Image: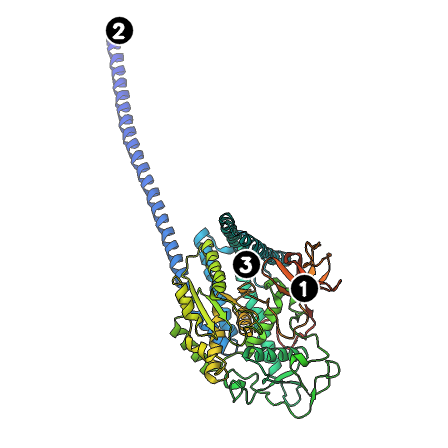
Amino acid sequence: MCGKDMTTTRVKLVALFICLWLIMLVTLYSKSGFEESMETEMLQKELRRAQENVKMLADRNKALERELLTSKAEKLVGGEIEVVKRDSNSNELNGECQRKVINLENLVRELRAFNDGGQKPEEGGKHGMIIPPGQGPSMEHEKARFRLADNIQELWYYLNRNLKKLGSTSGNELLEDVAHRHRSIEADLIRLSRVDNTEAWREQEHFELQSLMQRRLHHLQHPKDCSKAKKVLCDLNKGCGFGCQLHHVVYCFMIAYGTERTLILQSKGWRYAHQGWDSVFLPLSESCTEAGTRRVNWNGEKNSKDAEVVMLPIVDALHNHPPYMPLSYPEDIAPRLEKLHGDPSVWFIAQFVKYLMRPQPHLQLALDEAKQKLKFQNPIVGIHVRRTDKVGTEAAFHGIEEYMEHVEEWFLRKEVQGEEIKRRVYIASDDASVLPDAKKKYPNYEFYGDAAIARSAGLGSRYSDSSLQGLILDIHLLSLTDYLVCTFSSQVCRVAYEIMQTLHPDAAHYFHSLDDIYYFGGQTGHEETAIYKHVPRSKDEIALEVGDVVGIAGNHWDGYSKGRSRRTGGIGLYPSYKTVDKKVVVKYPIYEQVPLTET
């Protein structure tokens, strides 16, 4: 019995020992596994942290690469655009080169959007979307935007003029406050015009339309067989100044384009350059320069249809006017043009000016050297002050203070838009005293100009080679400014404004005229249509009913325009915002031989 108990006890002790040993092993194993697990988890955390750091560094590296690429692309575009614009002004339109620049500009916009949002624009939703060329915003959107811009400007003219009449301290403070609010609204309007990167579409659409027009003009001026081609003969030597003579040729060119006739310019003995137009500008044609002898005077489009050569008089003596006159523009491009530009008529006229004023290489070199010598740079405002023979006959005298008021306003608008820029002004004038007068009165401005050009523009030396080159330089540099302040009674300023339209998708509002609205001598009537009723408040105003047609005589830049009612015959003032321009859309030839897009 005792032996059995002892055996049982031993078995229990052995079992207990084995159990304790197993517990110890399990404990030791468990502790080792836990520590190993803890170490593994720590390693995993460090690994995750390292991975996050690597990703962060990679993201930073990508961002730096994008910023570097954007910077390089912007520098590349900035350098190349000047070359392309210069070349396209001096030679045949280099379409492929300009197309590449537009593509580079689009790339820069994409990179900027990529930097800002981390996604490519086409994947970034509506705020980063690039609208395909030819599509763009809707016609209704752009017409509403144009109308809004006009209304804001007319409201400012009205408030500015009437608040100035108060003449008190409170009135001046109110004017200052309203002026800043107006600048703020304009800044918002500019931002609205850039929503969804529509700038890229405008650039492309402008290029496509301008390229189409320049190719059509080139086609017209280079018929397959010059001896069989019908022609328009135009005499350059109209008895007036350069701007007037240029516009005379533009009128001839528009009729030639509308009647599908090659324009032959008769310019030998030109008062500005006796060797003729081709000694200064590129010839209108390299293959068709002779008019032939079978000539007839213009007698209307129908009556002159079969004539080989039609001779055009000056526009003032033209009878049986064809529809192809300023301010008309072609029906076939009207929808695209009305959507792109705030003043389609000016854009169309500008295309003829662009073709006509392509400089000869020696002139282009002189323009480039003069620009470099003056250290001309943008952003800059251009002032054209025409005096001498104009004052007292065609225009009133305007002191430099009147011009500078609008110059200062432009720079203030830029500051509200977030642009801190140096105040630069280019002055062109036929009065040599204007430039030193401006420098003395406005020391905080940097003025550019050439007194020698002003002296050569005087009445005694106006018709000379040096005067012509100085005049062309003034027009060239004025067109390169960002904003024009001038008198539209001067043809020189209107020419600069026209050329400006060829350099931007829409420069319709890049000006302020101290007198006239834009016009073209000999134009068809400039008419407007009333969209609101107007009840006269004084004997100086005329009544308007919705739908009334008004022949506009001018804008007084105070919220009111002056014109003649076609319904009542009355002449007087009416609120400018109550009317809209009546478009002159004409069935010009569509030139089917010229493809819509450049191949």
Question: Nearest the camera: 232 or 262?
Answer: 232
The residue carrying pointer 2 sits among few (fewer than 14), some (14 to 19) or many (20 or more) residues within 10 Å by Cα, namely: few
Look at mark 3 in the image and give the residue it sits on: 198
Give the percent coordinates (x, y) of residue 311: 67, 86
- Contact check, label 1 and label 2, Cβ < 8 Å: no
Residue displayed at 52% across by 76% down: 93
199 vs 169: above or below: below
Helix, strand, or loop for circle 1?
strand
- Contact check, label 3 and label 1, Cβ < 8 Å: no
Question: Nearest the camera: 354 or 3?
Answer: 354
- Contact check, label 2 and label 3, Cβ < 8 Å: no
Query: Which of marks 3 and 2 precedes in the sequence?
Result: 2
Q: Nearer the viewer, mark 3 or mark 1?
A: 1
Query: Which of marks 2 and 1 precedes in the sequence?
Result: 2
Task: Tell whether 374 sits left or right of 24.
Answer: right
395 vs 184: above or below: below
Look at mark 1 in the image and give the residue it sits on: 563
Look at mark 2 in the image and give the residue it sits on: 1
Query: Which of marks 1 and 3 precedes in the sequence?
Result: 3
Please indicate, yes or no, whether residue 330 appears anywhere in the rendered image: yes
Helix, strand, or loop for circle 2?
loop
Give the percent coordinates (x, y) of residue 597: 59, 71
Give the percent coordinates (x, y) of residue 471: 49, 78
Question: Nearest the camera: 133 or 20?
Answer: 133
Residue type, numbered disc 3: Thr
